[in-house]
Amino acid sequence: MKTNIGTVDRVLRIVLGLALLGLFAFGAIGVWGLIGLVPLATGLLRFCPLYGLLGIQTCSTSRSLP
């Protein structure tokens, strides 16, 4: 699996994911807060399947994950 998410994109995804999950945990937005798992997972894995399908790459070099 090649990485296709750059550093800035990665940080934004992780922050957004954690924010949505935090809002869910405190009951502010309900079950929809679980959608925060998607940006969190893609940020941690440095790979977005949708980016792969569309040919988008926000990282400067594509490298394989160990």
Image (cartoon, grey):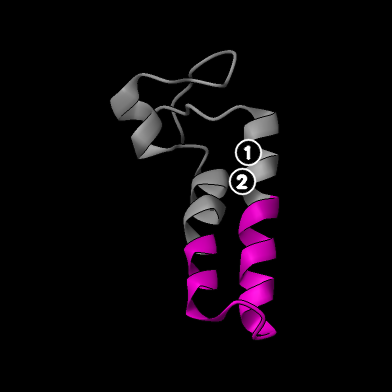
Residue 23: give x, y in percent of width and height: 67, 74
Residue 66: give x, y in percent of width and height: 46, 36
Residue 39: give x, y in percent of width and height: 53, 51
Magenta stretch contains residue 62: no
**Residue beneath the point at 70% across and 52% down:** 15
**Residue beneath the point at 33% across and 24% down:** 54
**Residue beneath the point at 48% across and 20% down:** 57
Q: SS at mark 1? A: helix
Furthest residue in direction left, as rendered: 53
Magenta stretch contains residue 33: yes
> Main SS of the magenta segment?
helix
Residue 53 visible to the viewer: yes
Identify residue type, mark 1: Arg
Tell me whether circle 2 and circle 1 mark residues in contact (CB < 8 Å): yes
Furthest residue in direction bottom, as rendered: 27
Closer to the camera in the image, 58 or 46: 58
Furthest residue in direction top, as rendered: 60
Apparent side of residue 57 relative to residue 13 in the rendered image (left or right) = left
Identify residue type, mark 2: Arg
**Residue beneath the point at 69% across and 73% down:** 22
Q: Label 2: few (<14), some or many (≥20) within 10 Å?
A: many
Residue 8 falls in which quadrant of the image? top right
Which residues lie in the magenta part? 15-36
Question: Is 59 drawn above or below residue 15 in the view shown?
Answer: above
Determine the CA span between mark 2 and mark 1. Answer: 5 Å
Question: Is 26 drawn above or below residue 14 in the view shown?
Answer: below
Apparent side of residue 23 relative to residue 45 in the rendered image (left or right) = right
Residue at which label 1 appears: 10
Residue at which label 2 appears: 13
Q: SS at mark 2? A: helix
Residue 1 visible to the viewer: no
